Image: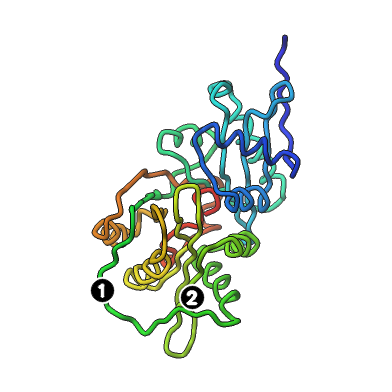
Amino acid sequence: MSTEWVISRLGEADRAAWASVVESVGWRFSAEEMDLFFATGETWGARRNGELVGVASVYRYEGPLAWLGNVAVVPDAQGKGVGTRLVQHVISQVEGSGEDTPLVLVARRELAPLYARHGFRAAGEVIRLEAARVLAPPLPQEPLAPGEDRDAWGDVLALDRRAFGADRSQVLQRAIRGADKTVVVRDGELAPQGMGVATASGEGTRLGPIVAQSDIMALNLLHLLAEDAEGPVVIDVWAERASFVHRLRKLGFEERMTSALMIRGNPKRWTQRPELYALLRPALG
């Protein structure tokens, strides 16, 4: 019997099937994470004779910028070109928008050559670190304090937009609604200087994004976000933040994996700033 492949956009009725595919490759997401991933992007699926066997999502941000994430193929369909079909389809969707939109992704190192064949180029690395618990030593104090006032929401979005280099307000607002804790820090004149978000995940407590003006500010944010965490604490950090990574290791964080940051299109169209210490998620930037 011939095999019929169909790629189509997934809808709400496909959410359970999507979850089954990503879980088949070992990914464990909380209900809030699944809602964040599935509801805020364009999710595409590859069906073989009607059965969903592969998925990929693209998240479009104002900048313009697009982010490719959660590319997964069920084990018994791997090595048959399903992932290639999905990636090519997402590329065609992004290029068909008519804008000069960079497409960015974070991929395991061993998959980097595959994405390179699709025109992606290495643009850096992302380090995932994990700690059983956060034991933060006393840190030099800066004139900062967590803020909970009515302006905090807009401040978080503005800080992220400036540091990330694109406007992803829709995704970030949904992430914050499902977060355990969001912290904004201000200077003596109440101007926002940094922020961080902590969210329950299938891996424990995930920290990110974190925007800060210095390593010390980032560490203070990390401590505020993780002080009540139960279970492991996970954070994805740009490898270029070497001094921050070193400080995290001294706090007991251990490296779990290093992934490749790759970009397709004009790299000058997107530049994240040094203030962005931790990603929201590798699949989201």
Which mark is in front, 2 or 1?
1
Check the image and report above or below for 144 versus 17.
Answer: below
- In the picture shown, does residue 205 fall above or below 161? above
Numbered-mark total: 2
Measured as percent of width and height from the top left, residue 260 is found at 42, 44
The N terminus sits in image quarter: top right
Rendered location of residue 233, percent (x, y): 39, 55
In this view, the residue in front, 257 or 31, is 31
**Which residue was labeled with disc 1?**
138
The type of colouring in the image is: rainbow
Helix, strand or loop at label 1? It is loop
Judge by depth and name the residue closer to the eye, 32 or 99.
32
Q: Residue at x 65, y 40 (%)?
A: 90
Question: Which residue occupies 33% across, 68% down?
Answer: 215
| Quarter of image, res 156 | bottom right
Quick check: 267 left or right of 50? left
Three-letter amino acid code at the position of disc 1: Pro
Q: Distance between the residues labelled 2 and 1?
A: 20 Å
Of the numbered discs 2 and 1, the one sitting upstream in the chain is 1
Q: What element carries label 2?
A: strand
- Please give the residue where the numbered disc 2 appears in the rendered image: 184
Q: In this view, does 163 lie to the left or right of 247?
A: right
Where in the figure is residue 212, as x and y percent of width and height? Answer: 41, 71
Q: Is residue 174 left or right of residue 181?
A: right
Is residue 226 shown left or right of residue 68? left
Residue at the extreme top: 1
